[in-house]
Amino acid sequence: MSYYFLVEGRRSERKLYPSWLSYIAPQYRRIEDPSEAEDNTYYLISAEGYPSIIGQHLQNAIADIENSGKFKCLIVVLDSEESSVDARRAEVFNAANKLDTPLKSATLEVVVQNRCIETWLLGNSRVVARKPQGTELRDFIAFYDVVINDPELSPLRAGFASYGQYYHSYLQAIFRERGLSYTKHNPGHAKDEAYLSQLKSRAELGHIKSFGQFLQLCSKLF
């Protein structure tokens, strides 16, 4: 069986998902072209953002899958951003149903990062310094403590134009306090197996629910 991942397009996601999949499903090998699909392989491509992911890129992914005939599932990964998880998921299914070329030879699964992948990454409680030296992280924690509270349920902090901007800045402050770096180009230690393990533990507590749904999907697929 082979799987086709269409991710929204952040550079961090292009590095995080292959790394995470190497721990979750080590028997699967990433391929560079859909024509290489065979048992125990997956193909991952970036859609270069929203809304293009549910426009031309979704149509192209389905065409790849139908031409190959070797993919079991198309997994679309995108942020909910200012929308809800259910609304974003429905948007993908509705877009797929309206295409001239339907998805027949594979199933469609949608992974929605609520609100963005940084929301999930804030679920690692161990990386958060409990007595930060810098005022930046102290201010974030004073506004909403992601160690105690579910990161997915945080309100938008004043001064930030979007949830994506807010969560990204929060995560960067956490990493900087530890002398580490996180950017959209390089997720750093967030790629590590130990980091993923902490996110799994947090999901088991009922937090970062959309990440838990991703783990459930992996359990079903691999």
Image (cartoon, rainbow, N blue to C red):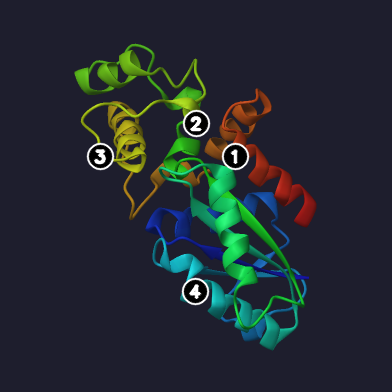
Q: Are marks 3 and 4 in contact (CB under 8 Å)?
A: no
Image quarter of the C terminus: bottom right
Above or below for 7 versus 213: below
Q: Secondary structure at mark 3?
A: loop
Report the Cα–Cα distance between label 2 and label 1.
8 Å
Element type at mark 1: helix
**Label located before the other in sequence (3 or 2):** 2
* Residue 132 figure quarter: top left
Q: Amino acid at mark 1?
A: Ser
Q: Earlier in the sequence, mark 4 or mark 2?
A: 4
Dot 2 or dot 1: first in sequence order is 2
Q: Left of 8 or right of it: where is 142?
A: left
Kindly tell me whether residue 32 is visible in this rendering: no
Check disc 2 and report the residue beneath it: 152
**Residue where numbered disc 3 is placed:** 161
Residue at position x 39%, y 13% in the image: 130
Circle 4 sits on which residue? 57
Q: Position of residue 182 (x, y in %)?
A: 33, 43
Q: Nearer the viewer, mark 1 or mark 3?
A: 3
- Circle 2: residue type: Glu
- Along the polypeptide, which appears first: circle 1 or circle 3? 3
Question: Are the residues flagged by discs 2 and 1 in contact, CB closer than 8 Å?
Answer: yes
| Percent coordinates x, y for residue 70 in the rendering | 75, 80
Q: Amino acid at mark 4?
A: His
User: Badge 3: few (under 14), some or many (20 or more) residues near its Cα, within 10 Å?
Assistant: few
What x and y, as percent, mark residue 207? 59, 27
Q: Nearer the viewer, residue 113 or 174?
A: 113
Q: Which mark is residue 210?
A: 1
Residue under the point 46% across and 44% down? 83
Asked whether the residues under the numbered discs 1 and 3 touch, taking CB atoms below 8 Å apart as contact, a structural biologist would say no
Earlier sequence position, callout 3 versus callout 4: 4
Q: Secondary structure at mark 4?
A: helix
